[in-house]
Amino acid sequence: MREVFQQELHEVQHRLVEIAELVAISIEGAVHAFNESDVARAEEVIENDNRIDGLTVELDELAITILARQQPVARDLRIVVSALRISASLERMGDMAEHIAQLARSRFPERAVPKGLRSTFAEMGRLDVEISRKLAELLRTEDMELAEQIRDEDDVIDDLHLRVFDKVLGETWKGETAATVDATLASRYHERFADHAVSISKKVQYLATGDWSAESVTPLPMA
Amino acid sequence: MREVFQQELHEVQHRLVEIAELVAISIEGAVHAFNESDVARAEEVIENDNRIDGLTVELDELAITILARQQPVARDLRIVVSALRISASLERMGDMAEHIAQLARSRFPERAVPKGLRSTFAEMGRLDVEISRKLAELLRTEDMELAEQIRDEDDVIDDLHLRVFDKVLGETWKGETAATVDATLASRYHERFADHAVSISKKVQYLATGDWSAESVTPLPMA
């Protein structure tokens, strides 16, 4: 039974990595579509999101089947529950990539990325792509060094997110209302994408170390 | 064992209702703070969110303990897994209320709600409050009529969300950039709040009827 369980856990991990890799492809396409007004690429990303959604639903079903069949307890149980949560966060990361692609498509043939913020969004996008690749690698290897890098890169994205607001609320901002709306939404999507990656990293860290403090700052009375 | 399990499920349900009621108080405060520039009320909401976060973590721990001790299968297992997901969505609803309160606080003593959109946000806010109360009631009673009402009200909020964008992108919009940013973010938070309520409603509907089609439009190959 134990061996079957281990095999099933490997299957779960394998699928999480697969979904994370699709999310990485999605965000790379979305960032390119947004920065370069590539509407064909935007369509691809929007299409691809159905696949991510379907795979997360299948993974959730697998996790529930494992809970029913193997009846895991203690750490094994937490691994399966964490897989469900990681799956939900990956699904949301896919949604954020889709939202960025939708912005690119809605403004086409104009550029969605507002003038005066191109370098900022190029940097945010580059970091989101890097984070997504590191996340897939983290899920594959459980190399905690990657979790720390993801957290550091998220800090940079948070700073860039604030810089977007400083820019649009500053005196030099000449953008029209549509540019302000696009900048606000796009920045939020880029920032949320990275937040979900950090949230997943913390769960992987917990699984690898058993240290719940990485998972949550709230005391856990029943832990 | 079965009786203990039923008692524990009631405890889970009781706690979900409790959290949903706190979320209803939060959104009511946030909507008031945002529409009336009530900074004291905004502070309360922001403070209150820690409590919601703490209670969802405790609930998750209880659910995991039940999985470990009772080893539920089939429908019972899905009830506990659904509780974990409902808890996550309630936590996000609390976050949305907090974000709306933060907007109110950040603009104080100015009003965060932009001129020309006061009646739209009053209506969105009213609907979010109503949805949150119906959601707590739905979790308590599993009265599916409430789930349908929540879905209908979410449709209205989606329309209002689009109307906000029509307004700020229209020729009559005289708002400054800060007003455009506030309108964009606030509208998104109001809309996401209702989305989470719909997502929870679908889970409750599944639990009450066993019909997964309400839960997800994606085919479930392993269901």
Image: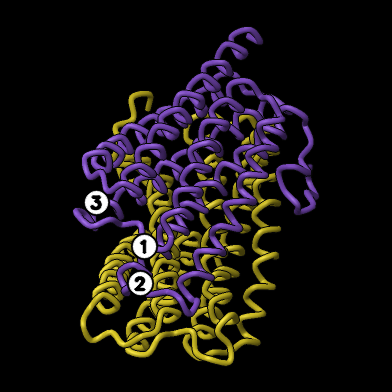
Chain colours: A purple, B yellow
Element assignment for label 3: helix
The secondary element bearing badge 1 is classed as loop
Report x, y in % for residue A5.
60, 14
> Hey, what amino acid is under mark 2?
Gly
For the residues labelled 2 and 1, the Cα–Cα distance comes to 7 Å
Q: In which quarter of the image is residue A138?
A: top right
User: What residue would you read off at disc 3?
Assistant: A105
Q: Along the horizontal axis of the image, is A207 left or right of A156?
A: right
Q: Which chain carries label 1?
A: A
Which mark, by number, is residue B183?
none
Give whichever of discs 1 and 3 has the lower sequence position.
3
Say if residue B1 shows up in the picture. no
Which residue is drawn at the image coordinates 55% and 45% (left, top)?
A196
Residue at numbered disc 1? A115
Callout 3 amino acid: Arg
Q: Between marks 3 and 2, how big is the CA–CA gap?
A: 19 Å
Up/down of B158 relative to B13, above or below: below
Identified at 34% across, 46% down, the residue is A98
Q: Is residue A196 left or right of residue B124?
A: right
Q: Nearer the viewer, residue B198 or A85?
A: A85
Parent chain of label 2:
A
Query: Which residue does the image show at 49% across and 80% down from the upper left?
Result: B31
Nearest the eye: A187 or B157: A187
In the rendered image, residue A147, in percent from the top left (x then y), is placed at 67, 35
